[in-house]
Image: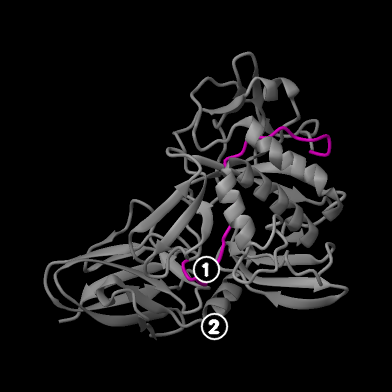
Amino acid sequence: MEGNGENLLFSSSASAPGIEFRGPRRAGGFPPFVLSDATTRSAPNMKPATLLLSSLILSANVHASDAVVTPKEGENVAEVVVSGTRDPALKPYRVMAAGLDAFDEHRKLAPEATLRFRLGKRDAIRTRKTNWDGVKLRLAGSETSTPIPIAADGTFVLLRSQEAYDDEADFLLNQKKSSIRFSPEVRTPGLPDNVRRLGDYRLECQVLIAIGKKELNFAMRAAFNAYALGGDWCSTVRKNFGISFMLPDWSINTTLTVDGKQKNLRTNGVNFAAPIQDKSLPDNALITFEYWSGASLERKQRFLAQFPIHLKSSADKWGAGQQMQSKGNTAYSTVIALKPGKWRFCLKSPDGELYLGAERGKTVVTPGSEHAALWHEYHNFIVDVEQAGNYEVSLDLQNPDLPVVGVKRRD
């Protein structure tokens, strides 16, 4: 993310990264009102005073209704029998019960849909598939212990259990503390993986919000109800109050189809603000995503060529940045004057559609070297400058899947 520092006003748990209420963040980061995950970073250019609810904020524990799918016979699942300690990122079973109640209550939005929960590793690269082998989960209380099967795609289902509810059961995970998050996923069967029904998103939002509200105290719920002009946060007409969902991949073209008519929709990297609050759109409207991973080399290069790319850095106090100049079809560069010190930078388009950052733990770029970059990874590069002068920052997009950033001294 651009800038540093944030004012954390409220957290659902002092130790657990769950749903949080955040205050202002400098230099284009979190807006004044955000419900988000403590470690999941949203797109950096959201409008001020927007309320963001990422569908990946949830670390879920659920008792599912009879409408929730159960593993199919022969489905490839990992049997989970594990001992461990409660991960504070995972919510108590009773909290997640509110989400399942909401699923039942609002079924008219997606009558044929099923509910699963999807795991996500907090430090995983979003464009890479995660291997869930060895990840084990169980629901346990003083008197109960139930293994939770995890499918190969990282999804799982939970059945209602009054016994677990009465036992105040928690979820135990055999992973590093707070390294796993999980979120609800509502889908109507029969649609391709890259197509979502608008009513499914609306129902998913109801599940998401119900779980979030369960952990807010009365004062916080009242405050957000007032801000949202009512208790239904998923359908509020208040401006600058939006619900954002995390996509499984970067969508380079998103279309809404209603009665055969199509309209382009905006995504912000892997964040998608589905138009669930637009009452003129029917629940059976379809949203189609053209995912980056399925596009050809030519299609990716054509898509990238549409956008100007700017160098933004702490050296100019995260201002408008310098536009990189094309040095061919896939090469770009610009020159910046740097004083001695450590300077942070990222590469992005002005509208935020493109964002290039560094992989966590691999952020330092030595002058005279090249460094792998990642799309929509919001960790700034750091260049350690020992001698003042002009430095050229370059970007090579010959392989769009493996962007390369370079820094070298010019004089």
Circle nearer the viewer, 1 or 2: 1
Q: Which residue is mark 1?
A: 49
369 w.r.t. 67: above or below: below
Decide: is 267 above or below 137.
Answer: below
**Residue drawn 61% across and 52% down?**
222
Q: Who is closer to the viewer here, 127 or 337? A: 337
Residue 380 appears at what percent x and percent y? 35, 63
What amino acid is labelled 1 in the image? Answer: Ala
Indicate the quadrant where residue 235 lies: bottom right
| Residue 134, horizontal then vertical, whole percent | 54, 30
Find residue 102 and report its image quarter: top right
Magenta residues, start to end = 44-68
Picture residue at 46% right of the left edge, 49% below the top: 10
Closer to us: 124 or 372: 124
Residue at 32% in and 63% down? 381
Q: Residues within 10 Å of mark 1 (few under 14, many from 20)?
A: some
Nearest to the observer: residue 271 or residue 396: 271
